[in-house]
Amino acid sequence: MILDELNKVFCRVFHAKDLVISLHSDASSLEGWDSLTHVALVSETEKHFKITFSFNEMMQFRNVGDLVNAIEKHLQQ
Amino acid sequence: MHFLSVPFLCFLPVAGLLSCFLPFKQRWKLLLIVSLLFIGLWNPGAMLVLLLSSLFTFYTGLLIEQNRKFRAGVYLLSVTIQVLSLFLLKYVESGSTGLHFLFHEAGFRLDLILYAAGFSFYTLQHIGYITEIYYLRSEPEKNPLDFLLFSSFFAKFSSGPLEQAPQLIAQFRKPSTDLTLIYEGIQRVVLGIFKKMVLADRLSPAVAHVFEAGQGQGSAITVAGACLFTVQLYFDFSAYSDMAIGSAKIFGIRLTENFDRPFLSTSVSEFWRRWHISLISWFSNYIYYPLVFRLRRYKGASVLAGILVTFLLSGLWHGLGFTFFIWSLLHICFLCFESLTKNIRLNASRRFPTFIYKPFSTLITFLLICFSNLFFRAPDITVAKQLFLQLQGPLFLSKGFMEGFLSILAGGGYQEVLFNFYLTLMFTGGFLIFEKHLSKPLLPGRGLFLRTFFLVTLIFVCGIFKQAEYFIYQQF
């Protein structure tokens, strides 16, 4: 499952072992998700899934669901 | 035409009433005529510059879309021309250059035409517009009149809020039919006039006294001056934004909110998410994020580089003076420090009770902003240095609190000026405490009538009518 793999990335970036994310998790529900973390998340996700996002994609990530959809799209290509 | 000039305050209700009688689909024509009149009657030279700039941007947008081979070149050339023209404006505006002398001697006040015309605000919007087209995030507008209205819309023309063309043009074509928007608009305009005339302008003499009085003031007065200026700047600029947003709502148009009670911020980064939101979004979308995205492999360093470049450019946008450079350097330091200590601060916020941690962080943030504004407000670097040195003096004054502090801030020891100063502090404090309630739009009824009556009475009884049309941010 992409979400489970992505959860590992979030745990690493947020330095929180017990963090559990859902498709609806966003900057308002996850403490510390700011511009710094956003870029780190994108970079770590790219490395973990061996994909490369475009700038427009990064700017459209509003929650975990958007990120999962983008990962799915890249993995299918 | 200024927002607080008599012609504008007569023109707004007349134009608003006229628009009510027009079919919704035709309103954009009225808005275009009204906007061009707003600029043209005030400064015909400014209108010519606006027309040329808008046509240039409009056709550049079309060219970028149609010409696949040279689109990068067209985009870069267009951005370069717009940035250079902005730089030229700031260079001429700084007044100490040969160019300024040259233009002045030729009897051609280019600086007046451009900066009075909100040139730097609509140029940023034009750069944003062609960047969106270049990166395929939006399509170019096909109708030059739509684009001209986007550039010239009177409510946001001279000092923003900065808007995106597709969203605003869609509203021009289909304005809201909701009547409550008109009530909200009128309330916002009244609130804006109140903030400007009763709060910002009443604080102005005390601020001017601290920043222009010269040497020999104690540190307590300098700290008070910096704090009062920060509050004055907030009321002045948010008053302008209220009037802009309110005027637009009267015509069924929603503009971007520019402020979200910034003095409640618990960090400088949060402050920048609540202060001049539309400008910060512009800098984030077109400078910070693209840069950080390109450098994302360097992780934390990419963010630090993004902060550095964004705030240096923001300082340059405010002016070429050394004071703005120091102001931007201070914010770079604050934000870099916050980025590097993010985890420590997160842990501290969890460890300490909220009722201790939050007020403490809010106070520290406010003081940091006030400190940086010492350089923002100082007329030149000599005064800024002098004020900075004064900060290091003794906090408590030997002459006593009344004689050595309050009466100096009030501009003299007379009972009348002291009373006026106390009144100003009372209004300011009271408004900041009840800001959320006072800013909340009400539906027609007793509450709305009482609040409007209260605000209008205070405007006429306690408002400062002298030079009320001058807004601090119009100089940028």
Image (tube, coloured by chain):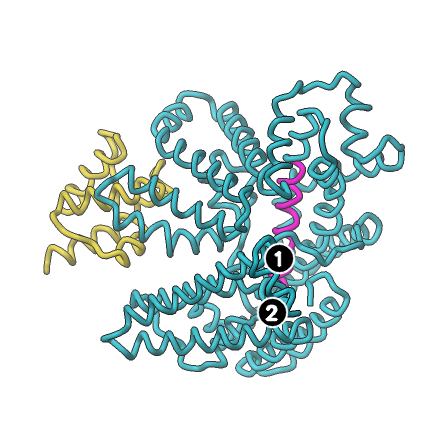
Q: Is residue B248 above or below residue A54?
A: below
In the image, is B458 to the left or to the right of B234?
right
Residue on which disc 1 sits:
B474
**Quarter of the view holding residue A5:** top left
Picture quarter with the C terminus of chain A: bottom left
Q: Is residue B277 visible?
A: yes
Residue on which disc 2 sits:
B154
In the image, is B394 to the left or to the right of B274?
right
Q: Which residues are magenta?
A: B227-248
Q: Residue at x 73, y 66 (%)?
A: B9
Which mark lies nearer to you, 2 or 1?
1
Percent x, y of residue A45: 19, 45
Q: CA distance from mark 2 to mark 1?
A: 14 Å
The answer for which chain carries disc 2 is: B
Percent x, y of residue B123: 48, 65
Which chain is assigned cyan?
B
Q: Give the mark nearer the N terminus: 2 vs 1.
A: 2
Q: Residue at x 86, y 30 (%)?
A: B413
Q: Is residue B80 above or below residue B453?
A: below
Chain A as rendered: colour:
yellow
**Category of crowding for the residue at label 2, using alpha-carbon neighbours closer than 10 angstroms: few (below 14), some (14–19), many (at least 20):** many
**Category of crowding for the residue at label 1, using alpha-carbon neighbours closer than 10 angstroms: few (below 14), some (14–19), many (at least 20):** some
